[in-house]
Amino acid sequence: MLLVHGKKLAKIKEFTDNTQACTSCKSFDLRVKIFKQYQHVYMIPVYPVGDKVVEIRCKQCDEPILQESLKKEYAKKGRAPFYFYSLFILIALIIGWAVYADGRDKKNTALWVASPRAGDVYIIKREKSGVTLYSFLKAANVAGDSIQLYQNHLEYTGKVTALNNDDYFELADMLSISKQGLQQLLDKGLIDEVKRDYDEADGFNRLK
Ligand SMILES: [Zn+2]
């Protein structure tokens, strides 16, 4: 059975102490290892759990040192490392990235509507009887103040960022719009996003 979640013991610190004597051979040469458990989900650490476990052993005679007071003292030196919170860090990074990407897309959309270029694809969003419909327009060419636009074939009921495999831009039936008209589409919220520098997989190069 796959172990989905559980606890795992990890060594969080290891050091040598030359200030305490071995109880057996009296050497001042102790190796200290501090362990702590963390809760994991699919092997990804979520948070630390339980008390620290301290293991002290003399480096000269290899005898374990069992003094509880010394163990307690050493335990203070170990802190749960950041990776014990990997899941939270991961989630924070994903959210951070999504927020950044969304901000970047909005900025690009505004910039690219203001200076259209042939090949730009506009994702069009409109409301019809309470349903949000998505479709695409693609700038075929930009000449002076006029932009010639291809329309795509299908209309989508959910948010889309690429053409379906069987969708394409239509060569016949092109639209013409002024730069100001394009800006108005954005201002009215009809342009949801602009795509530029897209790749072949998005299907934006299919024309029929
Ligand atoms: Zn010793």
Image (spheres, rainbow, N blue to C red):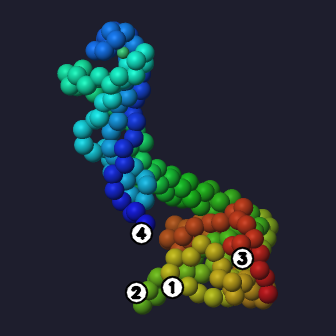
Q: Type of residue at label 4?
A: Met
Q: In this orientation, does residue 103 appear?
A: no
Residue at image mark 2: 130
Residue at image mark 3: 203
> For the point 40% across and 36% down, which residue is it?
11
* Helix, strand or loop at mark 2: loop
Q: Type of residue at label 2?
A: Gly
> For the point 29% across and 22% down, which residue is it?
65
Return the mark for residue 43. none
Mark in the foreground, 4 or 3: 4
Mark in the foreground, 2 or 1: 1
User: Observer-nearest residue: 7 or 133?
Assistant: 7
Ligand 1: image quarter = top left
CA separation in Å, label 2 and label 1: 11 Å
Mark in the foreground, 4 or 1: 4
- For marks 2 and 4, the one nearer the N-term is 4
- For marks 4 and 1, the one nearer the N-term is 4
Return the mark for residue 1. 4
